[in-house]
Image (tube, helix red, strand yellow):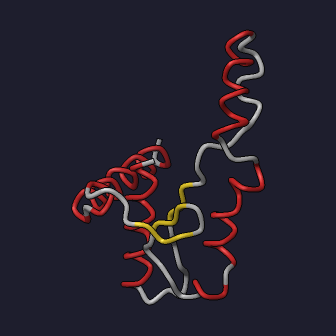
């Protein structure tokens, strides 16, 4: 998740610097109740009780992503982090521009080496 935020922030900065009219934001959908535990037997039953109480259903989990992508008031908003349909401050590490650039450069290096193989 940290890498996703760092990558999104660097992509947002890069696009803005190039004058590209595309916005990039990060979202945390929260814990979403899915069928991931369906093959865990007794553990699945225990987790299911906790999931029903504490976790979001799929539409609730999708809400923040839809909000960040589609809400008119966020038109032009870029480089932000959203949780539960609210802009939030990510961790200090996630806001580290030097680390974001290092990840960006490393990712590009890996992609380029794979393309040249």
**Image point 50% across, 49% down: which residue?**
115
Q: Is residue 11 above or below residue 23?
A: above
Question: Residue 100's spot in the image, x, y percent?
Answer: 31, 59
For this orientation, the residue located farthest to the left is: 98
Which residue appears farthest toward the top when viewing the image?
42
Residue found at x 37% / y 67%: 10
Height in image: 78 above or below 72? above
Q: How many marks?
A: 0
Indicate the position of residue 14 as horizontal and vertical percent values: 39, 75
- Residue 55, position in %: x, y? 65, 41
Q: Is residue 96 above or below residue 12?
A: above
**Residue at (44, 79) in percent of width and height:** 15
Residue drawn at (39%, 51%), measured in percent from left and top? 107
Answer with left or right where residue 63 lies relative to residue 113: right
Q: Is residue 56 left or right of residue 22?
A: right
As drawn, the residue found furthest toward the front would be 53
Task: Locate residue 56, reporting x and y percent.
Answer: 69, 47
> In front here: 28 or 105?
28
Seen from the viewer's position, the closer of residues 87 and 10 is: 87
């Amino acid at each position: 998740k940290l890498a996703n935020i760092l990558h999104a922030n660097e992509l947002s900065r890069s696009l803005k610097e190039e004058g590209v009219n595309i916005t990039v934001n990060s979202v945390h959908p929260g814990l979403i109740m899915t069928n991931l535990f369906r093959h865990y037997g007794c553990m699945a039953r225990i987790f299911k009780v906790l999931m029903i109480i504490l976790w979001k259903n799929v539409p609730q989990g999708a809400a923040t992503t839809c909000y960040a992508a589609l809400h008119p008031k966020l038109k032009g908003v870029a480089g932000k982090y959203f949780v539960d349909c609210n802009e939030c401050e990510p961790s200090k590490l996630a806001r580290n521009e030097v680390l974001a650039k290092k990840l960006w450069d490393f990712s590009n290096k890996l992609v380029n080496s794979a393309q040249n193989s």
